[in-house]
C-alpha cells in the first residue's frame, strides 16, 4: 500500500506521469502497456493501478497537463502586444515545437474525436481553453487599417492550428510515402516552423 504521507503520493504520481509520457511518445496510446509504464517508473503494476486505475485515466492526466501548457503559452502569445507578423512567427515556432515534444497528442486527438468527442471537450474545458480575444481584435484592426486582406479571424486561427498539427500527426505516413528516416523528417519539421509562418503571412498581407 502507498504511504499515507502527503509528499510520497505526489512524488510517485509525478514519477508515473513522467514514465508514462516517455512510453506514450515512443509507443503511442494504443501501443503503450501499463506493465511497460510500471517498469519504466520502477514500480509494480498494482501500484500503478492504485493511482490511476486505467491507462485511459493515466493518459488523460498527461493529456490535460499538455493542454494546460499549450493553452497557457498560446493564449499568452496570441493575446500579447507583439506585432502581428512577429506573433505569427513566434506562434508557429512554439506550437510546432511543443507538438514535437508531445507527438502522441495529435494521433490521440484524431482517434478520440471519432470515439469520445465529449471527453475531449471536457478535457479542453479542464485545461482552460478560451478564445484569444485580443488576437481576433488585432486581425480585425489589421483589416480595417489595410495592412492585411479581409480575413475571418476564426478561419485564420483554425488554419494555423490545423496546418501545424497535421505533419506531426501524419509522421508515419510522411516517412513512408517520402521514404525518409527520422533525421530527414525532423529536418522537414524544423524547416516548417519558418516556412509555414512565412506562408500564412504572405497569404494575408497586402
Image (spheres, helix red, strand yellow):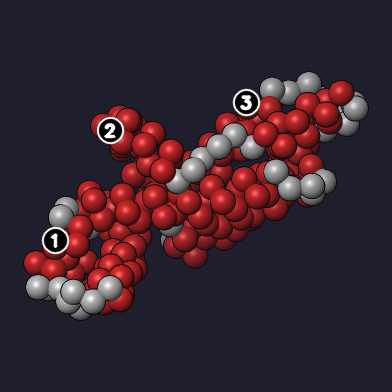
Q: Residue at x 28, y 73 (%)?
A: 6
Q: Residue at x 21, y 66 (%)?
A: 37
Q: Which residue is mark 1?
A: 49
| Mark 1 touches mark 3? (CB < 8 Å) | no
Where does residue 200 sit, x and y in percent of width and height?
Answer: 71, 37
Alpha-carbon neighbours of circle 1 within 10 Å: few (<14), some, or many (≥20)? some
Tell me the SS state at disc 1.
helix
Tell me the SS state at disc 2.
loop
Q: Nearer the viewer, mark 1 or mark 2?
A: 1
* Mark closest to the chain's N terminus, 1 or 2: 1
Q: Residue at x 9, y 67 (%)?
A: 46
Residue 195 can be seen, yes or no = no
CA separation, marks 1 and 2? 22 Å
Q: Residue at x 14, y 61 (%)?
A: 49
Where does residue 86 sit, x and y in percent of width and height?
Answer: 78, 49
| Mark 3 touches mark 2? (CB < 8 Å) | no
| Residue 155: assigned label | 3
In the depicted structure, whether residue 143 falls above or below residue 174: above
Amino acid at each position: 500500500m502507498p504511504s499515507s504521507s502527503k509528499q510520497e503520493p505526489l512524488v510517485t504520481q509525478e514519477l508515473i506521469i513522467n514514465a508514462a509520457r516517455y512510453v506514450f511518445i515512443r509507443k503511442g496510446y494504443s501501443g503503450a502497456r501499463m506493465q511497460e509504464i510500471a517498469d519504466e517508473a520502477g514500480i509494480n503494476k498494482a501500484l500503478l493501478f492504485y493511482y490511476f486505475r486505467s491507462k485511459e485515466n493515466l493518459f488523460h492526466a498527461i493529456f490535460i497537463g499538455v493542454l494546460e501548457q499549450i493553452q497557457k503559452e498560446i493564449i499568452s502569445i496570441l493575446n500579447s502586444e507583439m506585432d502581428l507578423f512577429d506573433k505569427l512567427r513566434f506562434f508557429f515556432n512554439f506550437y510546432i515545437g511543443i507538438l514535437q515534444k508531445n507527438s502522441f497528442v495529435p494521433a490521440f486527438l484524431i482517434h478520440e474525436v471519432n470515439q469520445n468527442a465529449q471527453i475531449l471537450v471536457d478535457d479542453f474545458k479542464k485545461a482552460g481553453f478560451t478564445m484569444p480575444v485580443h488576437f481576433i481584435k488585432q486581425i480585425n484592426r489589421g483589416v480595417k487599417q489595410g495592412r492585411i486582406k479581409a480575413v475571418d479571424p476564426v478561419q485564420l486561427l483554425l488554419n494555423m492550428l490545423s496546418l501545424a498539427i497535421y505533419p506531426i500527426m501524419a509522421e508515419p505516413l510522411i516517412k513512408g510515402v517520402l521514404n525518409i528516416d527520422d533525421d530527414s523528417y525532423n529536418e522537414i519539421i524544423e524547416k516548417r516552423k519558418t516556412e509555414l509562418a512565412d506562408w500564412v503571412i504572405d497569404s494575408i498581407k497586402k
